Amino acid sequence: MSLVVWALAALISIFGALCYVELGTSIRASGADFAYLCYLKWYPLAFGFMCVGCVVLFPVAIAVQAQTFSEYLIQGFRIEICDPTAAFFAKKLLGFALIWLLMFMNFFSLKTFVSRFQIVATFAKIAATSIVIFTGFYFLIFKGMTENISAPFEDAKFSVGTTVTAILSGLFAYDGWDILNYGAEEIEHPRRLALLIVDTVKVGMSLVVWALAALISIFGALCYVELGTSIRASGADFAYLCYLKWYPLAFGFMCVGSVVLFPVAIAVQAQTFSEYLIQGFRIEICDPTAAFFAKKLLGFALIWLLMFMNFFSLKTFVSRFQIVATFAKIAATSIVIFTGFYFLIFKGMTENISAPFEDAKFSVGTTVTAILSGLFAYDGWDILNYGAEEIEHPRRTMPLAMITGLVGVTIIYLAINVAYFVVLTKSQILASSAVASTFAQQTLGGFQYAIPFLVCILLVGSLNGTIFAASRYLHAAARQGHLPPFISCANHRYDSPRAALVVCVSVLEHNTPIGSN
């Protein structure tokens, strides 16, 4: 019955929100219901609404929320106040302090403090509720704790009075959908915004982690689609922070991206390319030092080749090669997937996946680390935002490319991991430096040598995309004055930021020699 009440309260709130969406987009006046009653010239009723709201509703709601904040803050810091009077006044003073702080923030415009702080508060709300939800479902699914929900309607006593009271309490929990109507005149594009209101190596846990990483990536891609089609500026997150005039934060993003993130990502991809290329040609280098330098030099050669390709426009070389790399990726993954499912269906190899969640050890640390690793595998959905100014018809191209690409990649990754688990054991997967090659050695016979070459081509495609993004990032930073002006120079014939490309490659080559793997 509790869940039914919550659902009814949500349904009523949705209907209310839709009504206020219609009112807020039709009548551009702040004040919500008071403004709409004045618009109809029902002044006595509007005065009554104003009196009740100012004297009762808003003061009581703010007092309850401030009191709740004080309770949670004292509990969070584990402060024990033995004297009831002291505890009472401590909570009240904390609530007063919060209210005065928020009043000061609201002295400025929505864009200055309030909306930014509200974004932080929203993320905190999502984080807190996500922790509770995932923990509850973990105990439900993996611990089998069903005794409290096994008979959901047993002994449920229905009473009109208690049910109505419960629904009204639920409506208070859903309250807030009309807040934008109180400041409708301060909102830009109200019609659009109003609509936006309305140890994991066990196969089971591994697939769950891959799916969660995909879901997070899809949400990220949707955010970047909206940003990329609204703000036509190359540079992705750096450009969007500059658009908001958050220059110190944009400078921090630029420093981390230019010095750490992009160079390290490119170095890892170049190193992986070298590993697969040497395996593909079956080259055995016995001397560890010689093997080390051979891999590094192969990586350097590839990076400089891609830099030269990016000297020309997107249409000349880069986009065409990216199509070839995409076909190589589809070919390589298709071979692995069909081979794995062949061994599963026709050979009956189910021993590695027969108990997908058996002995799976759940740990918050290892699970979060695994999800972060999965996010790296899905990385690339934001690359178009780094060169948004060079894309034709971005409102059509960017959503189509990002969403279809991510959905397709998610299906492929889940299928390819099932294929790996069918053929390879846990120890083989963990011990392998190139899992696709190990898989091919066990299943494809003489055709196994094709896999490393296909993987090399798709790695070149990934590396090409990263170099494209990194160079546009530096170019955008130089245009904003965060880097020397010469880096912002572009070739007018091919519209290519050649200076940024050379600087990008020069910086990342200092990272490539780091590490032996």
Image (spheres, rainbow, N blue to C red):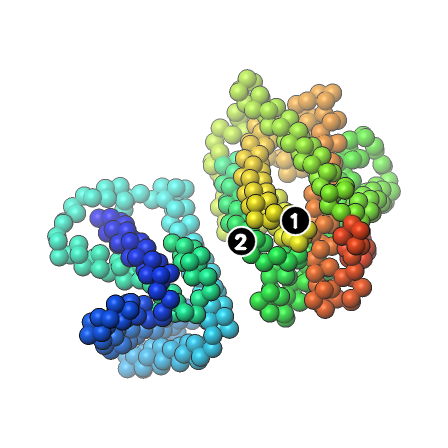
Q: Which secondary structure lies at badge 1?
A: loop
Left or right: where 246 falls relative to 500: left
Task: Give whichever of 351, 162 is nearer the camera.
Answer: 162
Task: Give whichever of 267, 319 is nearer the camera.
Answer: 319
Which quarter of the picture shows residue 413? top right
Seen at 71% across and 55% down, the residue is 472
Determine the residue located farthest toward the top in the rendered image. 346
The residue tagged 1 is 391
Measured from the top left, where is residue 146 in percent x and y? 31, 43
Task: Give whichever of 517, 280 is nearer the camera.
Answer: 280
Left or right: where 469 falls relative to 340: right
**Quadrant including the C terminus:** top right
The residue tagged 2 is 226
Measured from the top left, where is residue 167 in percent x and y? 22, 56
Count all numbered tags in the image, as a single digit. 2
Seen at 47% across and 31% down, the residue is 355
Seen at 81% across and 57% down, the residue is 499
Q: CA distance from mark 1 to mark 2?
A: 15 Å
Of callouts 1 and 2, the N-terminal one? 2
Amino acid type assigned to the residue bearing label 2 in the image? Glu
Task: Give whichever of 354, 14 is nearer the camera.
Answer: 14
Numbered tag placed on residue 380 in the rendering: none
Seen at 64% across and 32% down, the residue is 330
Amino acid type assigned to the residue bearing label 1 in the image? Ile
Look at the image and tell me whether residue 41 can be seen: yes
Measured from the top left, where is residue 161 in percent x and y? 13, 57
Task: Identify whether 440 is placed above or below 476.
Answer: above
* Mark in the foreground, 1 or 2: 1
